[in-house]
Amino acid sequence: MKRNTHDRENMALVLALLRSAQQFHRAIGPVFRAAGLTASQWDVLETLSNKGPMTVNALLERALGTSGNLDVVIKNLIRSGLVEKTVSGTDRRSRVLSLTTEGRAKVETFLPAHNAALAEIFEGLPADGKRQAIRMLNRLRRSMHHPRKDQPDE
Amino acid sequence: MKRNTHDRENMALVLALLRSAQQFHRAIGPVFRAAGLTASQWDVLETLSNKGPMTVNALLERALGTSGNLDVVIKNLIRSGLVEKTVSGTDRRSRVLSLTTEGRAKVETFLPAHNAALAEIFEGLPADGKRQAIRMLNRLRRSMHHPRKDQPDE
DNA sequence: TTGAAATACCCCTACATAGGGATAAATACC
DNA sequence: GGTATTTATCCCTATGTAGGGGTATTTCAA
């Protein structure tokens, strides 16, 4: 059967992946916190800054880390005055999200700090190691797929 | 300065890492859900099963994914009757966590399903790619470090 | 036009995560 | 013994994550 070796390797891979992600969150967390943002909020701000105004639905497709509940993130950004939501002119179901003046200013000031923090977090990693890691992670992600919910015995 | 290339590579690395972790969560989520568990709960159950009873503090050091608030996870496991908490005989501040009979049964039945799900999620990845990924991720994690909160100008 | 279906969004619940502060017990110091 | 500090745990608030269901609007079909 030789199932055990296989299983242990899978678990080791999962642990390595999740611990790396966790380590990153812990490293970047205080940087966001100091700016009064969260990782998800920054993701939205940056996307709106790069791509311009877009609907909630469009943002959902681009957004990192979240599937259904961008809602809360958006609500908090609106409450902070960084983002505004208007009803689309062409489809009254749609809401268009855009940065406020304050939101654009936030991106302006925080982006350099964010980049500097990333540079510092990864400063121990050589550039080619970085590229190799990126390739490997993308390959890993693409090779993962959802298990069948149940396998009808035949 | 050539700062931009560097910054873009860092962002690409972050995206690759977080998207991989997210993809994994989405793949494994339904498996946990079908068993009435969450990823964190399973992590605790498995640790207690492997290492035997231990204090909350000891578990905190081993636990994946969580820093301060194992509390909630433990509370939910106790409510489900899978784990029990007793006051330590030697140090009355400490609580010793252990699996109940029901908890041990849960591990027995769920472990094979969990291993099968992992095997299926990673079935597209060759064994040596897996080992390479593990090495790379561990190197990545070790090379990350926290940015200085502030850098006193000298 | 009317009804059915799809779409875009919102709300609700449960759980996890992060940080900070509170409490009780143990330990160190005097 | 008495006080201060450390340690182990618990509680509180805010946020994010995941899933499921509800509502308004649009589109499709008859």
Image (tube, coloured by chain):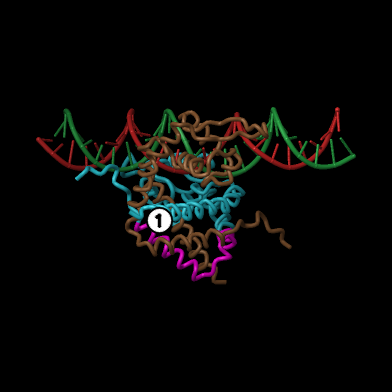
Chain colours: A brown, B cyan, C red, D green
| Residue drawn at the location 58% of the way across and 53% of the way down | B27
Q: Is residue B41 above or below residue B50?
A: above
Q: Is residue C25 above or below residue A26?
A: above
Q: Report the quarter where the C terminus of chain A lies.
A: bottom right
Which chain hosts label 1? B
| B105 or A14: nearer the viewer | A14
The residue carrying mark 1 is: B5
Q: Is residue B79 above or below residue A15?
A: above
Residue B125 belongs to the span the image colors magenta: yes
Residue B151: give x, y in percent of width and height: 25, 44
Left or right: residue A68 versus residue C7 is left
Residue D16: give x, y in percent of width and height: 49, 40
Number of numbered discs overlaid on the protein picture: 1
Q: Quadrant of residue A39?
A: top left
Q: Quadrant of residue C22?
A: top left
In this view, the residue farthest toward the front is B1
Magenta portion: prevailing SS class? helix
Which stretch is magenta?
A: B115-143
Q: In this rendering, does residue B18 appear at all?
A: yes
Q: In this rendering, does residue B52 appear at all?
A: no
Q: Secondary structure at mark 1?
A: helix
Q: Amino acid at mark 1?
A: Thr
Left or right: residue A119 versus residue B41 is left
Residue A118 belongs to the span the image colors magenta: no
Q: Report the quarter where the N terminus of chain A lies.
A: bottom right
Residue C13: give x, y in percent of width and height: 58, 33
| Residue drawn at the location 50% of the way across and 53% of the way down | B21
| Residue drawn at the location 71% of the way across and 58% of the way down | A152
| A12 or B18: nearer the viewer | B18
